[in-house]
Image (cartoon, coloured by chain):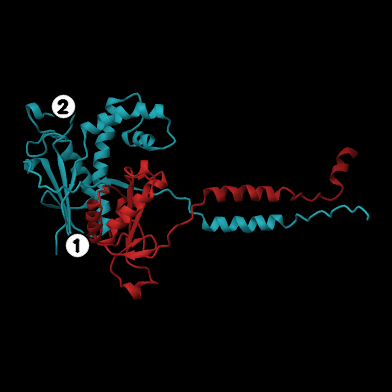
Amino acid sequence: MSKFKKKKSGELPAISTASLPDIVFMLLFFFMVATVMRDSTLMVANTLPAADQIQKLDKKDRIMYIYAGKPSSRYIDKYGAAGRIQLNDKFATVEEVGAFILAERASKRQELQNVLTTALKVDGETKMGLVSDIKQELRKVNALKINYTTRVGDYRQNIN
Amino acid sequence: MAKRAAPEVNAGSMADIAFLLLIFFLVTTTIETDSGLNRKLPPMDEQEQEDIIIRQRNIFTVVVNKYNQLLVEEEPTEIQDLRQLAVEFLDNGGGQGEEACDFCQGKRDPSSSDNPDKAIISLKNDRETSYKVYVAVQNELVAAYNELRDREFQRLNPMMGTTFVEANKTYNDPRTSLDTKALLKPKLDEVKVLFPQKLSEAEPNKN
């Protein structure tokens, strides 16, 4: 009997926190590796439409991004509420899209230049006129592979 | 001089520093892979192409107007019905003789498409159409093709136990081994030949 009593007696030993930094560092490294810093700040509204028949865009080095939508609230006084195109960090006109694509293409590695995809990140509320203009510009510079970037979701979210 | 042991650095605050960094990266992280609908634009030809005569019954016209309303084959339609209508059109197989379609399971209506190879979906939108409705329409049309391709893929490869969409995803995944890719490619191409995606987009209305 005395055997069992012995165990109960005495205070609980403190849990060692010596390995806490190790655990935290492990998490830290995971997030450091998984982090992708946004390379351009969005200046336009960008609520993407939903779709479910989608394909993934792997390999970030093969993608050129074009943003479009109405300017976000910070810029709405200056640029108005009509849909605008954003290339890198600034607003652009439709005519500048071609030059942008050529510059992006030239900055990529030689073997990738023919397999580039243009990702159109266009806000759902944008009018198709702007999107059609972008597509015409892309055709002019022969950037034919495009991707309408969407959220994952049912198409019914888009109507109403 | 007396030899003095270097005092041990207190590592107690190491966890705090690590936490600080951890929280910074937690906040800035966006683990996202973009996904969306892949499309290919038609090349811009300098010289005028000669007109190809396409029979009216082989064209499936979809028009979206500026009020985001849908007109399919001259009939006002709800977007919920679009997928089914597109499947019926593509799978119709109304052709005779040379143009007969032996794998189609449609109604063989002589006023609808001859075979999937001839069938063209023509999408036209207005400049005022909203982008999200356009994406929804595109999504439904791609879904119609995917539905038929899945069916044919499963018919031709009953042992694979997968669908066209799944197989295509595996094929496009950069982590898939080259052997698997080489195995999948002919099977995917076979189905793509049966149901080629012929989606033509007209230039939008000006107004």
Q: Chain A is shown in which shade?
A: red
Amino acid residing under circle 1: Tyr
Label 1: few (<14), some or many (≥20) within 10 Å? few
Tell me the quadrant of the picture where the C terminus of chain B can be found. Answer: bottom left
Q: Is residue B169 above or below residue B125?
A: above
Viewer-proximal residue among A5 and B36: B36
Residue A121: x and y, percent? 34, 56
Q: Residue furthest top?
A: B159
Q: Residue furthest bottom?
A: A77
Q: Residue furthest right?
A: B2
Residue positioned 39% across, 49% down in the render: B34
Tell me the quadrant of the picture where the N terminus of chain B can be found. Answer: bottom right
Residue B24: x and y, percent? 57, 58
| Residue where numbered disc 1 is placed | B67
Q: Are marks 2 and 1 on the same chain?
A: yes
The chain carrying label 2 is: B
Residue positioned 28% across, 64% down in the render: A93
The chain carrying label 1 is: B
User: Could you say which disc has been placed on residue A78 in the image?
Assistant: none
User: Could you say which disc has been placed on residue B102 in the image?
Assistant: 2
Answer yes or no: is residue A1 visible: no
- Left or right, residue B54 beside residue A137: left
Amino acid residing under circle 2: Asp
Q: Chain B is shown in which shade?
A: cyan
Residue positioned 11% across, 28% down in the render: B100
Q: In the structure shown, which secondary structural element does the residue marked by tag 2 occupy?
A: loop
Residue positioned 67% across, 58% down in the render: B17
